[in-house]
Image (cartoon, rainbow, N blue to C red):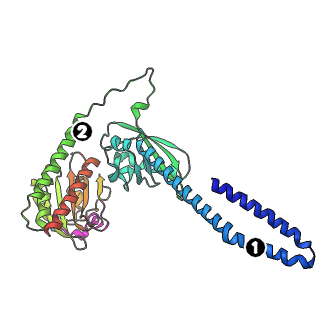
Amino acid sequence: MAETDEFGEQFADFVRRVAELKAARSVPAGDLPTVLEAALFELDHVVDRLWPWFQRLSSDGVTAMASVDRQEQQLLKALFQRVPVPVALMDRETVVRRLNFAATAFTGVRSGYATGRPLTGFLAHADRAAFRSQAAAVARGEGDRSLTVHLQQEPSVPVRATLTALRPGGEPRTAVLVVLQPADDLAPSGRDVVPGPAVPSLSETTRRAALMDLVDAMATALLSLPGEGAAPALERAAGVLHGRFADWVVADTGAARLTRTAVLGPAECAEEVAALAGQDPAACPLVVEAARGGSTALQVRPEDPEAFGRDASGAPVLVRANVTSLLCVPLTGASGTVHGVLTLFRSGTGPAFSMAEAQAVDMMSRHIALAMARLN
């Protein structure tokens, strides 16, 4: 600040001297060379001293402002993460950009997994269309919205989702900020309620324990491979998932050129298993998309009956297998190379795949890909 003040005084003196030189234009012609020499001296003073000084001060000011901006951004990010209310930032298509710690605990989905995926994927199937519609309206500037939804992991518990428009600095499009709260907590009450310690759900604890057992079984199977090649490794992994986790397991090896490696299904569906084993993986849109794009697909009550193609008889695979939910996961290695695709079906009246189960399969798929790359 002291240097800035000194520059201001120097510049003010220069302005006064320039004014005096302008007034000296009326002196006799014989004295004009002296005035011209003084004017040239002042120009040299500006070029050699005042202008570099001004550039240095301007550069320091921009750097200081940039540093302040970075500090402000870091502070805002920390506040977003630490605010004790579940908050998500998404775009107009409901794709998650950020999920704070409270939202991670509330939804049971880790932030790294949620980022880049639609928030509607965490919701019950019946709520997705309404949520997408309200999010689009908020992004268009039609005002804040609020609606009741249900998380896929706890479909019996109503959740109040409040949506508001937000324009992040320096971005051309409007984002949508979502606040999630249990609907029961918003009900008016005539007395103050002191919240007690959260009691874990027995069913949720059981499901998580079963997933941990599954991940452990998969790790054991992959670590005990005798080194027979990539395809046997995928077959071993399919055997771990079949029965205890999925009714059907379809394993395809490769990426640019897919090969059907294993098909495991219910014991009473031997004919359907044989038909599916003879199917060309390139005729399965879901498999091809996973191999090319490298993204996991989770579908509950799939809308497109031909998403997994047709079997040798011409019947849609999803219809013939009575598929109620599916997971299609690319087996992506550490370098980003896709080594194959793993598809899991659940059929009949069993529960649909949940987001927590999809997370577990996503983690196991990376382990399977590492084993395949090592044995290839």
Q: Residue at x 31, y 40 (%)?
A: 154
Q: Main secondary structure of the magenta part?
A: helix
Residue situated in front as seen by the camera: 203 or 368: 368
Q: Residue at x 39, y 45 (%)?
A: 100
Decide if residue 278 is on the left or right side of residue 140: left
Count of residue discs: 2
Secondary structure of the residue carrying tag 1 is helix
Residue 46 rendering spot, x and y as whole percentages? 71, 69
Q: Which span is picked out in magenta?
A: 276-295
Q: Quadrant of residue 343?
A: bottom left
Task: Mark 1 or mark 2: name the one nearer the start of the chain.
Answer: 1
As measured in the structure, the alpha-carbon distance from the residue carrying label 1 to the one carrying label 2 is 84 Å
Q: Residue at x 57, y 60 (%)?
A: 60
Q: Which residue is mark 2?
A: 204
Quarter the C terminus occupies: bottom left
Which mark identifies residue 84?
Answer: none
Q: Which residue is mark 1?
A: 41
Dot 1 and dot 2 residues touching (CB under 8 Å): no
Q: Nearer the viewer, mark 1 or mark 2?
A: 1
